[in-house]
Amino acid sequence: MNHIIIVDYRDEWPEQFRALGGRLRGALGSLVLRIDHIGSTSVPGLAAKPVIDVQVSVLSFEPITKLQNALASVGFVWRADNPDLTKRYFREVPGQPRTHIHVRRAGSWSEQLALLFRDYLRAHHAVAADYAQLKRQLAAQFRDDRSAYTAAKSPFIWQVLRQADEWAQLSGWVPAPSDC
């Protein structure tokens, strides 16, 4: 059984991302506009599932074979069954550390949303602490049900995104340059 486990922040996560980002940049070359560390492991101090999430921003998903081949060369497989059509989702090959590659169109709402959520949590430590507490509680409650765990986090995430939108408007937020 693949239980949901939340661990304390690990100082090695940024370095793991940098190494992976370098491999991805080398494999994807001109196909990619930016590569960013997203998700909970990208927020210093935030407890998380020990999974590195990477957002790869591209101009177009087509031809998908170029993305598939480039990512396969560094050990990632396209999950064509992913129901979120705003991205193309890739995962590690069996036996490798759990990694999520989210390929999104540059400038799209979904690309910006992931970056805004990350940056807001980085700038608001108390909100990140509340998120960590909620994740630990939900992981204990839904230990073996990833869908229920994810669904139960949604109200909090949307509340934070409303706050992040206000913060972005007041601060003039724009995404920082690509992480890699």
Image: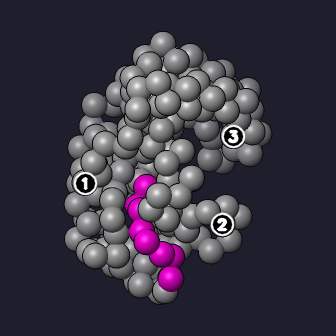
Residue 91 lies, in percent from the top left, at 50, 63
Instruction: For mark 3, give the secondary structure.
Output: helix
Instruction: For mark 1, give the secondary structure.
Output: loop
- Dividing the picture into quadrants, the one containing residue 150 is top right
Determine the CA span between mark 1 and mark 2.
25 Å
User: In the picture shown, does residue 49 fall above or below 132?
Assistant: below
Residue 32 lies, in percent from the top left, at 34, 69
Tell me if residue 31 can be seen.
Answer: yes
Circles 1 and 2: CB distance less than 8 Å? Answer: no
Determine the CA span between mark 3 and mark 2.
18 Å
Circles 1 and 3: CB distance less than 8 Å? Answer: no
User: In the picture shown, does residue 134 fall above or below 26?
Assistant: above
Mark in front: 3 vs 2 = 2
The residue at which mark 1 appears reads as 180
Is 61 within the magenta? yes
| 36 vs 59, nearest the viewer | 59
Q: Which part of the image, by quadrant, shows the C terminus?
A: bottom left
With 22 as the anchor, is 164 left or right in this view?
right
The residue at which mark 2 appears reads as 85
Instruction: For mark 2, give the secondary structure.
Output: loop
Number of the label disc, if any, that sits on residue 149: none
Categorize mark 2 by other alpha carbons within 10 Å: few (<14), some (14-19), many (20+): few
| 58 vs 146, nearest the viewer | 58
Q: Check disc 3 and give the amino acid type.
A: Thr
Number of the label disc, if any, that sits on residue 150: 3
With 94 as the anchor, is 87 left or right in this view?
right
